[in-house]
Amino acid sequence: MEFELIEFIKNKITTDSSVVIGIGDDAAVMEIPQHQQLVVSTDTLNYGVHFDEKLSPNDVGYKSLAVNLSDLAAMGAAPKWCTLNLSLPELKQKWIEGFVSGFLDLAEKTRINLVGGDTTAGALSATVTVFGLVDSDKYLQRSTARKGDLIAVSGELGSAAYALKNPDSQLIKHLQKPLPRLDISERIKGFASSCIDISDGLASDLNHICKKSRVGAKVNVEHLPVHHEVKKNPNWMSYALSGGDDYQLCFTFAPKHLSQLPADCTVIGEIKCGKQADFYSNNEKIESLQKGYIHFNKA
Ligand code: ADP
Ligand code: MG
């Protein structure tokens, strides 16, 4: 059955000329272009921790790749190859077919080559590793934001967290099929000074930039891009700042590059001296926020 699964996957994919040896040998072999560097990231989705029956097998397959592509986007890297490690309690054909089609739909759209993986019996879990390319030394980092830089985010924040609590909302697609922002990454990589993808919520992820870059941040919450349906909810600020699962990009850049900011990105504040991200409403610091998001419960 394991061999059947591998054959099933193999028959569904095509690979480009960068793949010298793909699925079927003891290891894969790939051609790495000169003057480029390899960027690698991996993430695991465990049943009961990161997903449950509420997410269809197709969505789990899609998401297992999407969250990894989001990490490549944050590094300014173009996706090139990936591996898929599946742990399955029993080989339930319907679940596997759903998973594989969700995974391969996104792989095809983003032109990433599936070059291998592993299939084992165990608790339901999917680990994806992605390999991307950047021009040498042109990767983006969390640790390079500078005082005076502007802070921007892509898309809208809080939609996935809102949909988790309001599953009948049309915003549910943000939870089921988050779009990794490879499009934005491509357009900002030439001028952004730092970047992170927002997986845990803006408050937490912008603080990673602050800590790593040894700077502070001032964000105006009135400027946060939030869908009007979420904005109507009294908890909109919690969803937008600490809901998580947004998979948008948060990045910084020198103000002289403002005219290069892509559509679908919003300036939300600036980098200051300091040690953390502070959030302001009508020029007043929101002191209760810290407590608010610690108590915010995603479930
Ligand atoms: P080995 O015992 O040498 O590790 P496997 O039987 O695990 O070989 O894998 C055989 C081939 O199938 C390898 O090329 C491996 O990368 C690929 N493979 C196994 N499982 C998966 C999977 N879930 N997705 C993609 N490729 C897989
Ligand atoms: Mg193996």
Image (cartoon, rainbow, N blue to C red):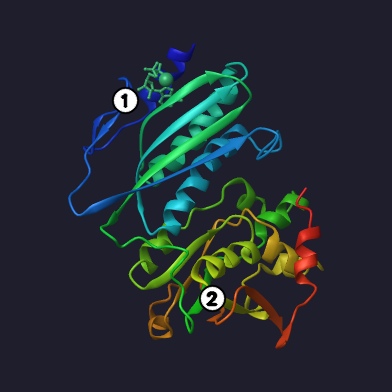
Outermost left residue: 34
| Left or right of residue 229: residue 125 | left
Task: Count residues near mark 2 (Cα–Cα under 10 Å), then give few for <14, some for 14-19, many for 20+.
Answer: many
> Residue at (52%, 73%) from the top-left corner?
152
> Residue at (74%, 65%) from the top-left corner?
238
* Amino acid type, callout 2: Val
Secondary structure beneath dot 1 equals: loop
Q: Quadrant of residue 23?
A: top left
> Residue at (68%, 38%) from the top-left corner?
49
Cβ atoms under marks 2 and 1 closer than 8 Å: no
Residue 290 in sight in this render: yes
* Amino acid type, callout 1: Ala
Does the residue tagged 1 have its C-beta within 8 Å of any atom of ligand 1? yes
Judge by depth and name the residue closer to the eye, 155 or 198.
198
| Left or right of residue 287: residue 20 | left
Q: Which residue is mark 1?
A: 27
Residue 180: % across, % down: 49, 53
Secondary structure beneath dot 2 equals: loop
Q: Quadrant of residue 284?
A: bottom right
Residue 65: % across, % down: 49, 41
Q: Which residue is mark 2?
A: 215
Label 2 and label 1: CA atoms lie apart by 43 Å
Task: Count residues near mark 1 (Cα–Cα under 10 Å), then give few for <14, some for 14-19, many for 20+.
Answer: few
Residue 221 in sight in this render: no
Depicted 281 relative to depicted 1: above or below = below
Depicted 207 relative to depicted 63: above or below = below
Please identify, in this view, whether the residue under mark 2 or under mark 1 is nearer the observer: 2
> Residue at (45%, 48%) from the top-left corner?
69
Q: Quadrant of residue 46?
A: top right
Depicted 147 relative to depicted 74: above or below = below
Judge by depth and name the residue closer to the eye, 293 or 20.
293
